[in-house]
Every structure is written in structure tokens, then in C-alpha cells.
Image (tube, rainbow, N blue to C red):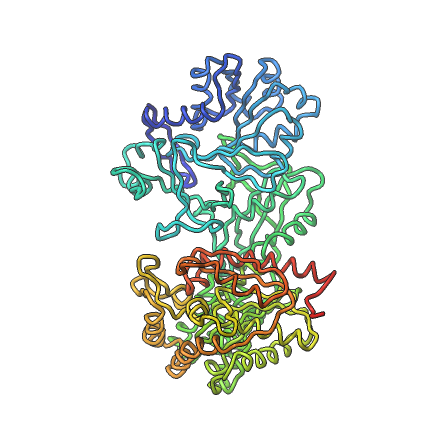
């Protein structure tokens, strides 16, 4: 039917060929949604004809027997000219990009806007729609409906749509049209759970034929659809999205707008969406800018009304974004630069004024080598010797890379040292001291934060490194891990859960002498966390938060298999339900995709052979990890819990259980408050992989914030 050239996000034009069948599928879906069937429909064609949504402006009146008003060249970005057309021709429908709509609302007077009262339908697309702009539209044109259209040229104009109501705090891109399908997939093309970010793939009847004269690029972007009929395809959009609980899709940004800053992967679109929700904000662009020193800075460009200032924006971001996602530089502009299609032109944004942070240089050879390796692994120009590896964006996986590279450069280092001494200077001192006898029971996963710390108790195996992945989700509080003394210090194995709880309470009170305490545990760690909480309450301390990840309690005389299966991960997992249960071990040690396990016994074997062979754990430490696995079921079943005076947040892995509800149910008789359960679509050992942490982390953060607010009024001390 037509070929239209688009540069998309790459800047290199490519011709997209659209068939009659695909175009008609789009037009039928559009007519079904909007109901353009009347000669009274008057459509104002604002978009340039080089922008593919303009096809709708031309064909809608043909199908409805309505009218189309064509504007003169140059009038597309003239708010007053567009106002005149709407008033003169009694326009009922208009479609434009959000930045142009924002310009109209900011430049036209209240009288001008009220004069456009014939508008009944307003559609936007091509850019993200800020909530503040949506709210402004409803305020000035309450008689009109507002629709957010999303879709690349390759799937014909738009493939998902959302009607945006008044008072919306976020603006989704909606649900697929009747003739389109949508999949949110991870890097291995597996569907991701609700709330987890993934790449959007689109399929269905609205699929274009491909790129004219570019078969290689067509094959790369148009891939086989495993869920459709034979020969069907889906288009890889390159957009990062997530499913919302109500079945709509939320746009987060571009894959090519995903950046790595100080070791953390950041979706610029997600940050833009949060800033756009600030009152008075019209447009937002967030980007990464290199400083003259070589360091990278997150910069936010913002336009808005007179209430928008750097101080207001910083306060808004601080309450909604994790520290590593907050822009360090803010630039407030009168207007955003735009390109010929009316979209924001990022290449024409002004250079920001950057402030260089304090830098402390290495003083010894070991400090120099360690600082170089930190910078190499984290993608930084240089690293101050006083900054924590984890504060700079390091995580459990990148920590293993640091240890491997240090050993290749002749610096003896153990992985556990990096968690105990995460700054360059601290780690260099431990290396120079030959390791020495250290207490690695309590490790620092993140040192900074103004709020009370979160203490995380190890799962079976005795290591707490897995919890390092929570750093990007838990805001403004230190995070500590508690590790089995037998595993990390070669102490004799504990005889009971109560013995471990007593030891761990002693450890955390060295860091935090008084409550309120916040305790989280996974697997056997969940049971230990409960024992710690009741022990603290018994001496009059406050426990404001108790969290449990896939662990259950059994009353005396109960079925111990419930604990063995859910609490320690020792049960076999049916291979047709979970082809690989390495979970957090895979992410932690960067295991190759060919290394798989179907049972916990196979996981233990991989820990013993693969991981020990990497040299990241000493051989005797691997043996003690195995001892910890073996001891967990017996410790769990012999534990006789006291009543915890308060509620508990439970996270249940649902993929490996016939009756997932039994996990949360097992806690009800052992706590006086509510049992708040969150299902996670994974298996027991997958609770610490990236996809699961993306579900669990924000829920813990919300519960911790609620506990902090509640603590100002009450407490969880026993009465």
C-alpha cells in the first residue's frame, strides 16, 4: 500500500513497506476504538506527512464520511494557527505529539483554550505522555477524551492504546489493539512476570512486510512468533516496558536508552517518567554526559511552568527514585529543541555545567591496582580510594570479576574480603595483612543511608552475598548480610536455630544497639529471622519489619517436609516446570548458560565443582557451604517458634509448589499481626535472580517505608 522512511532511534533512514492487509487491520482497529462513523467528525491534520500517524488523518474521514482540515506548511507548530483552525472548522479530533500539545497549553491563553470547546477526542503518540500534561488537558478540555497511542512504524502507526483519565499518576501505553499481540520478553525470549521490565515484541495482522531492499535488517528485527500460526512473525521494538497488574503496559524507555552508570543499568525512560510526574513539569529528557575528568553524570533537562525549579525537582526525585537513579545535574529550559517531526531533538540540548566530585588518589601499589580494577569493572575513568565498591554501583556479579582480575594481576584476594572491606583502601589493607582472622559473619552490602539498616539473614549454604542485588531497590538505608559463622569463619556448626539467632542478634547490636530493627531472611534465613525478632522483643526491643522469602514454619507435630521443600530448597523440582534452578548462584558467579540444574542436589554439585574450580571460594569453604546445606532441614524442623508480636511480609516462590498458599499460611499462628503474602513466579532457588529481585525489592522498600512511617505512631514491642 505504501512505503514510508523512518529513522527510528538509530538516525539512519530505512524504508518500511506496509501492505494493504496490515493497513486495513490498523484502520479497522482504529475505527472500532474511536467510533469515527459520522459526517460530523472533523479531523485536524497537524502531523507532517513524513510521520506515519498522518496516514490516519487522511483515511479516517474516508471511512467515516467526515472532514479533514489540512494546515499550511509551517502551521503545524504554531499554537495560534492551530487554535484558529479548531475554532473556524469546529474540529472534533486532533492528533499530535505530546511536546506540541504541551506548547499549546503553555502558550495559549485560557480564553484561547476554552474557545476550542468542540474538541471531543485528543490523541497523542510518538513520545511519552507526562502525567502532568495529561492532567492539564483534562483541566482545560474536560469535554474531551485523551488517548495515548503507542506503536512503531513497523507495526503500522499504533499497536497499543490507553484512554487516559483524570488524576492518573502514571500514563501507560495501554493494551494491544484487536489486531495486534504484545509480548514482554527477557534476553532469552522468555516471558517476564508482571512488574518486571523486558523488551516489547509485537505481532498480529498489523505487521509490515519489512525494510525495502534490506533483507538482513528485516530478518534481524522481524523474528519468528513462537505463539502464532506457522509463518507468523513478531517485531522486536527495542522498547523496554513492563506489564501492570491491571493488564496494561507501561513504557520505561529504549533498549538503546538503557545506560550503565557506575555499574548500575539504568532505564532513562523510567527516570523521565518519574520526573514528568512532578507538578508543573511539561517535558523531560534525561541523558548521561561525560565530564572533562572522564566521569559520567546523569543530567535531567526539564521544561515547565514558573513553579518548576531545581530545588523542587531534586526533592521530588529524592522521594521517588533510588539514589543511583537521581540526576546529579538539572537544567531547566524555557523550551525543548524539536526536530522536523515535532519530537524532542536530543542532539541540540545545551551542554550542562558539571561539578567535579572530590577524588582521593591511591598511595600504595596495591591501592593503585585495586583502584584500576574497580574502574575497569565498573566502567569508570578512575575510582577514589575512599568510595565503596557497592556505592559506586558494584554488585555480587561484578565483585567476582574484581577478584578474578586482581588474582590475574598477582594480588591475592578472596571474594568475601570485598564484601567486608569494600573500599580500595580497606581492601588493600586486608590484602597487605594476608587476610588475617576476620569476623565475616556480618558483612556490609551497602554502607550509606540515613534510615535504619536492613539486616538480611543467609539462606541454606550460609552466604549472604545474594542480597547485594537489593541495593538498587532499597532506598536510603544501609544493608547488612548475616552469614553462617561455620561457613565464613570455620567455627563449629551451630546446634540450633536459637543458637544462630542469639549470635546474629549480638552481631547486629554491635552496628545498631537499639531498635527499631528491620530483618529479612530467605530459606532457612527466614526462620532464623523470626527467631531473632522474637529474641529482640523478649528484651524489650522494637522490630519494625520482619520479612521472609520462601520459608515456612512448622508447629510441633507438623509435617517437616513443608520446611524441607520450601525452606531449604532441598526438594527436586519437576523438570517440565523448571528447566534450571540455579537462580541466584548463576547470577552471582556468572555461570555459563550451558551449566544447568534440575534438582537442588545438582545445584550442590555445581557449587562444589564449577564455582570451586573458578577459585572464588577456597576448597575448605566450599565444603563448609555444603555442610550448611546439609544441616538446614534438621535445624528448621527442630525449631520451636515463639509468637512474634507484629506482622510478617512473606514472598512465596510459586513455580515449584503444588500448594503455594501453604507457605504464608504456616506463619499465621506464629505472628500476632497480618501475614502479607506476595507471590513470585519463580522457584525457590530463583528468589535472588534479577527478575525476582525486581519484584521483591520494590515491595520490601514499600513495606520498610510504611514501617518507618508507622514507627512514629506505634511499635511492635510485645504488650
Vertical arrangement, residue 363 with respect to residue 127, above or below: below
Locate residue 277: give its quadrant: top right
Say whether residue 425 is visible. no
Question: Residue 28: which quarter of the image?
Answer: top left
Task: Decide if residue 23 is on the left or right side of residue 474.
Answer: left
Q: Position of residue 696 (x, y in %)?
A: 51, 58
Q: Position of residue 602 (x, y in %)?
A: 32, 70
Residue 573 horizontal/vertical position (percent): 35, 63
Q: Is residue 452 left or right of residue 383?
A: right
Q: Nearer the viewer, residue 640 or 373?
A: 640
210 or 74, which is in the foreground? 210
Viewer-closest of 587 and 249: 249
Lateral position of residue 591 relative to residue 370, left or right: left
Q: Is residue 302 visible?
A: yes
Foreground: 96 or 505? Answer: 505
User: In this figure, what is the number of numbered marks?
Assistant: 0
Instruction: From the top left corner, tell me how far across and down residue 375 is, in percent.
Output: 48, 66
Quarter occupied by the C terminus? bottom right
Report which quarter residue 59 is drawn in.
Answer: top left
Residue drawn where x is 32% and y is 59% of the image: 579
Q: Quadrant of the N terminus?
A: top left
Q: Is residue 140 above or below residue 570?
A: above
Amino acid at each position: 500500500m505504501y512505503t514510508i522512511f523512518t529513522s527510528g532511534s538509530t538516525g539512519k533512514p530505512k524504508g518500511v513497506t506496509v501492505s494493504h492487509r496490515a493497513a486495513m487491520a490498523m484502520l479497522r482497529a482504529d475505527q472500532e476504538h474511536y467510533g469515527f462513523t459520522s459526517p460530523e467528525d472533523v479531523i485536524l491534520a497537524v502531523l507532517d506527512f513524513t510521520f506515519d500517524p498522518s496516514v490516519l488523518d487522511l483515511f479516517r474521514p474516508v471511512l467515516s464520511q467526515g472532514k479533514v482540515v489540512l494546515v499550511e506548511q509551517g502551521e503545524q507548530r504554531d499554537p495560534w494557527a492551530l487554535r484558529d483552525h479548531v475554532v473556524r472548522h469546529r474540529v472534533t479530533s486532533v492528533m499530535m505529539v505530546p511536546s506540541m500539545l504541551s506548547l499549546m497549553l503553555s502558550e495559549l491563553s485560557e480564553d484561547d483554550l476554552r474557545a476550542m470547546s468542540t474538541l471531543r477526542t485528543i490523541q497523542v503518540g510518538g513520545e511519552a505522555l507526562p502525567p502532568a500534561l495529561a492532567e492539564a488537558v483534562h483541566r482545560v478540555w474536560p469535554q474531551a477524551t485523551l488517548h495515548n497511542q503507542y506503536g512503531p512504524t513497523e507495526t503500522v502507526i499504533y499497536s497499543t492504546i490507553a484512554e487516559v483519565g483524570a488524576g492518573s499518576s502514571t500514563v501507560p501505553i495501554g493494551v494491544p489493539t484487536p489486531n495486534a499481540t504484545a509480548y514482554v520478553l527477557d534476553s532469552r525470549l522468555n516471558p517476564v512476570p508482571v512488574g518486571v521490565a523486558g523488551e516489547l515484541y509485537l505481532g498480529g495482522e498489523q505487521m509490515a512486510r519489512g525494510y525495502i531492499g534490506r533483507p538482513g535488517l528485516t530478518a534481524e528485527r522481524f523474528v519468528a512468533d513462537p505463539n502464532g500460526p506457522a509463518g507468523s512473525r513478531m517485531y522486536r521494538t527495542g522498547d523496554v516496558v513492563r506489564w501492570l497488574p491491571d493488564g496494561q503496559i507501561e513504557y520505561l524507555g529504549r533498549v538503546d536508552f538503557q545506560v550503565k552508570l557506575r555499574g548500575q543499568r539504568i532505564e532513562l525512560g523510567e527516570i523521565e517518567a518519574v520526573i514528568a510526574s512532578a507538578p508543573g513539569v511539561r517535558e523531560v529528557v534525561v541523558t548521561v554526559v561525560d565530564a572533562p575528568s572522564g566521569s559520567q553524570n546523569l543530567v535531567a533537562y526539564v521544561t515547565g511552568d514558573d513553579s518548576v525549579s531545581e530545588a523542587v525537582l531534586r526533592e521530588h526525585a529524592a522521594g521517588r527514585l533510588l539514589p543511583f537513579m537521581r540526576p546529579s545535574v538539572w537544567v531547566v529550559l524555557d523550551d525543548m529543541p524539536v526536530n522536523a517531526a515535532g519530537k524532542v531533538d536530543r542532539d541540540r540540548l545545551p551542554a550542562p555545567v558539571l561539578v567535579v566530585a572530590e577524588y582521593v588518589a591511591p598511595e600504595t601499589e596495591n591501592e593503585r591496582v585495586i583502584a584500576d580494577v574497580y574502574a575497569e569493572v565498573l566502567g569508570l575513568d578512575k575510582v577514589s580510594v575512599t568510595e565503596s565498591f557497592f556505592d559506586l554501583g558494584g554488585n555480587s556479579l561484578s565483585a567476582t570479576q574484581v577478584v578474578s582480575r586482581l588474582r590475574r594481576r598477582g594480588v591475592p584476594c578472596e571474594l568475601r574480603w570485598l564484601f567486608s572491606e569494600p573500599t580500595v583502601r580497606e581492601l588493600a589493607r586486608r590484602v597487605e595483612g594476608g587476610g588475617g582472622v576476620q569476623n565475616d559473619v556480618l558483612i556490609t552490602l551497602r554502607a550509606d543511608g540515613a534510615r535504619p539498616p536492613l539486616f538480611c539473614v543467609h539462606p541454606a549454604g550460609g552466604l549472604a552475598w545474594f542480597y547485594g542485588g537489593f541495593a538498587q531497590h532499597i532506598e536510603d538505608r544501609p544493608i547488612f548480610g548475616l552469614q553462617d559463622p561455620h561457613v565464613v569463619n570455620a567455627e563449629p556448626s551451630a546446634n540450633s536455630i536459637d543458637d544462630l539467632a542469639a549470635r546474629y542478634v549480638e552481631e547486629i547490636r554491635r552496628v545498631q544497639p537499639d531498635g527499631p530493627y528491620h530483618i529479612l531472611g530467605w530459606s532457612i534465613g527466614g526462620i532464623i529471622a523470626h527467631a531473632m525478632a522474637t529474641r529482640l522483643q523478649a528484651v524489650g526491643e522494637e522490630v519494625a519489619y520482619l520479612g521472609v522469602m520462601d520459608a515456612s514454619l512448622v508447629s510441633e507435630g507438623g509435617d517437616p517436609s513443608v520446611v524441607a521443600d520450601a525452606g531449604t530448597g532441598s526438594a527436586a523440582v519437576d523438570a517440565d516446570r523448571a528447566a534450571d534452578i540455579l537462580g541466584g548462584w548463576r547470577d552471582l558467579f556468572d555461570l555459563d548458560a550451558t551449566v544447568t540444574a534440575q534438582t537442588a542436589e545438582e545445584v550442590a554439585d555445581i557449587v562444589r565443582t564449577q564455582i570451586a574450580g573458578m577459585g572464588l571460594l577456597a576448597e575448605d569453604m566450599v565444603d563448609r557451604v555444603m555442610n550448611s546445606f546439609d544441616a538446614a532441614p534438621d535445624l528448621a524442623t527442630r525449631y520451636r517458634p515463639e509468637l512474634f508480636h507484629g506482622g510478617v511480609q512473606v514472598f512465596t516462590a510459586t513455580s515449584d509448589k503444588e500448594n503455594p498458599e501453604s507457605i504464608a499460611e504456616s506463619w499465621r499462628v506464629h505472628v500476632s499481626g497480618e501475614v502479607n503474602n506476595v507471590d513470585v513466579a519463580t522457584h525457590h532457588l530463583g528468589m535472588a535472580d534479577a527478575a525476582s529481585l525486581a519484584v521483591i525489592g520494590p515491595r520490601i522498600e514499600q513495606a520498610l517505608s510504611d514501617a518507618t512511617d508507622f514507627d512514629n505512631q506505634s511499635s511492635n514491642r510485645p504488650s
